[in-house]
């Protein structure tokens, strides 16, 4: 082979080299930098390599140069966005709701120009497929590279591109500084930020601020609340040992703790990520769906595939401890069209639940030619209703069908009523559909 046609990596122009390196992981870049002194400066080039990596990965979703007012390192930005990217999508509030708490259970995280925003998502109450979206949590970086997380208690402010600067200058009132702590990959805890309180506590015990210890650490320990409590205990024990008035310091600290709890504006909330929010070719019913129930109210449904088959639950039942599914089946096999005359009659004789706008402009029944597959299902009633002898009461009342349509959506209905609930997608290409800003 002609040696003139052999090229090494060094022979490529720098922009080509940066483009190639941008596909590597940080660990791979570090390993590559060890191969030659010539590549050390190239791999450490923040404004070139690390900007290229961030732009290639997130440039279509957010404006890389706007983060941190354009004054932070792109290596730090990569580390932050790489961690926060797991937030994108749907989360549901975990645990029993508090008394008189009507907050929506679903949270939807999405990219903003220079921040991540979390919005509460709830069904509309006007008989349409519209989804109410109320932004309440913003996550970004300050120009100093510090994480800035704020939430709005009533969720009624709009999203400004420069909201971080507005918050720092005090232009936006009634915001609460919070920590978003990752407890594994699929569980986060949102709690009020008490870092300032612990700094004041350090001053009262030692006469100085505990600046030598990072109370808002960004290390591997994602549970910020446990770290802060540990630091507080350390201060407390140390003060009691070296101070002749340690007992008084302890009582003073307890009094301050009670005052802090009395001023707390945000109760900690746990959120669990909803995986597999969208259907796939092998799992066409999977994901989050929305459908009109009883012709007037919109409801959210979560359909999941597991080892036992397919199960569908209302999202509102997930936190209430209800074990009754809307429908389930252990046989995931579809029956292909053309349908038998009996199955066509079962479908054609039922009324479709539609939104008021759809019902006013279209016929209430979809033609059977739109159905591509059907599936046999059961409702929850034959699982939980028993007669006095302990046997299932009329188990056939729980039988029903799923009608899978050619456009990828589906509807379901049971033999004990005369209706079909047609479901629609909630998200498409990562975007929330039919949203109405609150």
Image: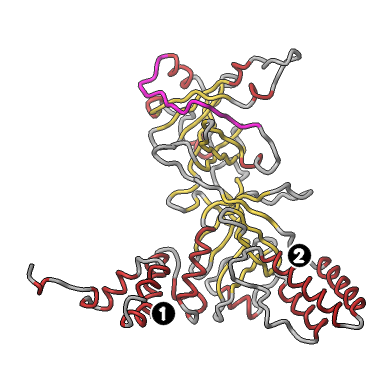
Identify the secondary structure beneath mark 2. loop
Left or right? Give the position of 96 relative to 304: right
Q: Main secondary structure of the magenta part?
A: loop
Q: Which mark is residue 419?
A: none
Q: Quadrant of the N terminus?
A: bottom left
Q: Is residue 237 magenta?
A: no
Q: Which residue is mark 2?
A: 265
Left or right? Give the position of 263 relative to 386: right
Provide residue 73's location: percent of width, then percent of height.
Answer: 47, 79
Indicate which label's residue lies in the foreground, 2 or 1: 1
Label whose residue precedes the other's in the sequence (2 or 1): 1
Res 188 visible: yes
Q: Quadrant of the C terminus?
A: bottom right
**Residue lying farthest left?**
2
Number of numbered discs: 2
Between 11 and 314, the one lying in front of the other is 11
Q: Quadrant of residue 214?
A: bottom right
Identify the secondary structure beneath mark 1. helix
Mark 1, Cα crowd under 10 Å, few <14 / some 14-19 / many 20+, is some
Vertical position of residue 341 compared to residue 433: above or below: above
**Residue lying farthest bottom?**
207
Q: Which residues are magenta?
A: 324-341
Provide residue 330's location: percent of width, then percent of height.
Answer: 52, 27
Q: Which residue is mark 1?
A: 46
Between 346 and 246, the one lying in front of the other is 246
Provide residue 187's location: percent of width, then percent of height.
Answer: 61, 54
């Amino acid at each position: 082979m002609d040696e003139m046609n052999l090229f090494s990596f060094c022979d490529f122009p720098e922009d080509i080299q940066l483009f190639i390196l941008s596909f590597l992981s940080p660990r791979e870049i570090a390993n590559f930098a060890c191969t030659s002194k010539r590549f050390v400066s190239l791999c450490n080039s923040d404004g070139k390599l690390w900007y290229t990596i961030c732009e290639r990965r997130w440039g279509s979703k957010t404006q890389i140069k706007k983060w941190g007012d354009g004054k932070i390192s792109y290596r730090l930005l990569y580390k932050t966005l790489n961690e926060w990217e797991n937030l994108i999508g749907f989360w549901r509030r975990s645990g029993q709701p508090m008394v008189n708490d009507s907050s929506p259970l679903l949270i939807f995280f999405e990219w903003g120009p220079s921040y991540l925003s979390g919005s509460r998502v709830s069904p509309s109450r006007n008989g349409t497929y519209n989804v109410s979206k109320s932004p309440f949590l913003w996550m970004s970086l300050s120009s100093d590279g510090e994480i800035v997380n704020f939430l709005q208690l009533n969720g009624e402010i709009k999203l400004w591109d420069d909201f971080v600067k507005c918050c720092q200058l005090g232009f936006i009132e009634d915001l609460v500084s919070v920590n978003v702590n990752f407890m594994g990959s699929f569980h986060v805890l949102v709690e009020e930020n008490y870092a300032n309180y612990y700094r004041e506590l350090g001053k009262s015990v030692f006469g100085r601020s505990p600046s030598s210890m990072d109370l808002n650490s960004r290390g591997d320990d994602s549970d910020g609340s446990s770290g802060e409590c540990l630091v507080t205990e350390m201060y407390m024990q140390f003060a009691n040992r070296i101070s002749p008035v340690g007992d008084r310091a302890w009582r003073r600290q307890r009094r301050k703790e009670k005052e802090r709890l009395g001023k707390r504006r945000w109760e900690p909330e746990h959120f669990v990520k909803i995986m597999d929010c969208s259907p796939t070719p092998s799992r066409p019913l999977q994901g989050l769906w929305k459908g009109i129930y009883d012709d007037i109210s919109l409801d959210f449904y979560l359909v999941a595939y597991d080892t036992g088959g397919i199960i569908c639950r209302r999202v509102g039942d997930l936190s209430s401890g209800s074990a009754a599914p809307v429908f389930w089946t252990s046989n995931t096999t579809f029956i292909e069209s053309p349908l038998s005359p009996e199955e066509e009659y079962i479908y054609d004789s039922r009324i479709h639940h539609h939104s008021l706008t759809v019902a006013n402009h279209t016929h209430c029944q979809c033609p059977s030619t739109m159905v591509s597959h059907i599936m046999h299902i059961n409702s929850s009633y034959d699982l939980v209703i028993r007669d006095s002898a302990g046997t299932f009461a009329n188990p056939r009342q729980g039988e029903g069908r799923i009608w899978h349509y050619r456009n990828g959506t589906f509807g379901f209905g049971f033999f004990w009523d005369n209706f079909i609930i047609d479901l629609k997608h909630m998200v498409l290409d990562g975007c929330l559909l039919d949203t109405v800003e609150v």
